Image (cartoon, rainbow, N blue to C red):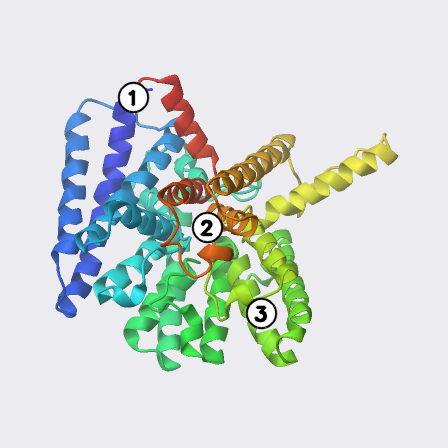
Amino acid sequence: MSYHVYLSTIGRILLMFSPTFLIPAAVAYIYSERLDFFLIPFFAVIFLASLFFLLTRKKIPETTEEGEAYISVAIIWLLIPAFGSIPFILHGINPLDSFFESVSGFTTTGTTVITPENLPLSLLFWRSFMQWLGGFGIVLFALVFIPSIKRSSTLFMAEYPAVVLPKTKPKMRDMAIAIFRVYLVLTIAEIFILNFLGLDFFEAVVHTLSTLSTGGFSTRSESIAAFKDIRIEAVVSLFSFLGGMNFGLIYALTHKQLRSLADLEFRYYLFIIVLAILSLTAINLNRYGFLESLRYSSFQAISIMTTTGFTTVNLEEWSSSAKMILLILMLIGGCTGSTAGGFKVIRVVILIRYTILQIYKIIEPRTVKTIKYGDFALEKEIIEEVIVFFILYISIFIASSLVLTLFGYDFETSMSLSATSLGNVGPAFGVAAKSAAELSWIAKVVLIINMWMGRLEIIPVFTFLLSVVRREKW
């Protein structure tokens, strides 16, 4: 592999990313705030992208191999948050906290080390705009402008790994454009609804960007609880739910393909959320009345399951059993092809069905049953990939939890921090319940690594690290 491939791919994506700094710069101009917060990283990105182009003037391959794409994705998802942290650094926040906030933004995690009330409006907008960009996926944007990727889908699969069915093989460029249209229409719709319900236009925009991206950054330290409005909670819950759905399914529904609602993953996604709401409502009856319990349980269950991470109550006041349910939801996450993080619903379904099948084979050794997704039997390779991913996911969750306990954090705090960072969720329990600002530097580094791996679904990061260890030619 040649470093020209990496520099060329990364350079083109950085060049495409650079104009995004002009939008918060416009916000800064409107509110008479510092433009250099965003103009400096804007020119820095252009300079680096131009440098990469100069270094790759020689002919490079017309297609990108899968391994090269994974490595490029892993590097991009470190470089972009690095540039995204510059506005926070210029504001006076230390580099580690700035990078943490930027990684949390672009990975749509939403765990914060900053008190939002202390930030200028342009930086509040930038935090949520990072999540909106990260939710849709910088790499998915790249597909529209970089058609030379091998099979036009390698980078897409690095960004949105999913169970690919034989029947669903549209052109990735067309799919990217179609999904972006859905994303944009839903964004505009939520902004107007929240504004109509009483949020000022700025807060409506900021919270919309954080909702549909399932990010969770807010302008208020109390999150959505600060508004004390059940109508706003209902709208945020609805769009969080949509953000956790497969956007291909939403696109199909906009074209009146109602049969799409019979999709296996969507049915389980809905079932798990309903089950969690009923369970949490029952558990919280000793704390609230029935309607209050249903209200708070519904919001928290949807917010955590979709990995949005907004809250309307102090989760530290909830019982251990309620927290355990939320922890499980953190690990599961939303649907494939969504903005949500986590292990993903369809993988859970496949694991459960595979386990049942193996037990059945012990009872009936001659059985020839297969695991199906809709009308299609899943290939053995897909099932093996799901099992490998499960092992990696749980191993990283356990390992990062152990590391945090070694540095003095209690078991509840360590497990929730590991789950929330790896699943790109946001809220945590224990000492980090309100903010991650007081965490030690080593804990912040662990969470940054988890957020990075969780957003890219582990494999690209492992591919990148393996290439570094092997010292392959770049």
- Describe the element under mark 3 as helix, strand or loop: helix
Question: What is the x, y in percent for residue 429?
Answer: 51, 57
- Give the residue type that dot 2 points to: Asn
Image quarter where the N terminus lies is top left
Q: Answer above or below: position of 82 versus 416.
A: above
Question: What is the x, y in percent for residue 86?
Answer: 21, 48
Looking at this view, is 235 or 255 the one in front?
Answer: 235
**Residue for point 73% across, 37% down:** 370
**Residue for point 17% across, 52% down:** 90
**Residue for point 35% across, 28% down:** 64
Between the residue at mark 1 and the residue at mark 2, the CA separation in whole angstroms equals 30 Å
Location of residue 324 by image quarter: bottom right
Question: What is the x, y in percent for residue 115?
Answer: 32, 62
Give the residue at mark 1: 474
Q: Around disc 1, counting alpha carbons within 10 Å, would you say few (fewer than 14), some (14 to 19), or many (20 or more)?
A: few
Q: Nearer the viewer, mark 1 or mark 3?
A: 3
Between the residue at mark 3 and the residue at mark 2, the CA separation in whole angstroms equals 20 Å
Give the residue at mark 2: 424
Q: Answer above or below: position of 105 versus 194.
A: above
Question: What is the x, y in percent for residue 362?
Answer: 84, 33
Q: Earlier in the sequence, mark 1 or mark 2?
A: 2
**Residue for point 37% across, 53% down:** 438
The mark found on residue 298 in the picture is: 3
Q: Does residue 142 appear in this view?
A: yes
- Describe the element under mark 1 as helix, strand or loop: loop
Q: Does residue 255 appear in this view?
A: no
Image side of residue 386 versus residue 2, left or right: right
Q: Earlier in the sequence, mark 3 or mark 2?
A: 3
Q: Are marks 3 and 2 in contact (CB under 8 Å)?
A: no
Image side of residue 240 versus residue 473, left or right: right
Looking at this view, is 364 or 387 the one in front?
Answer: 387
- Describe the element under mark 2 as helix, strand or loop: loop
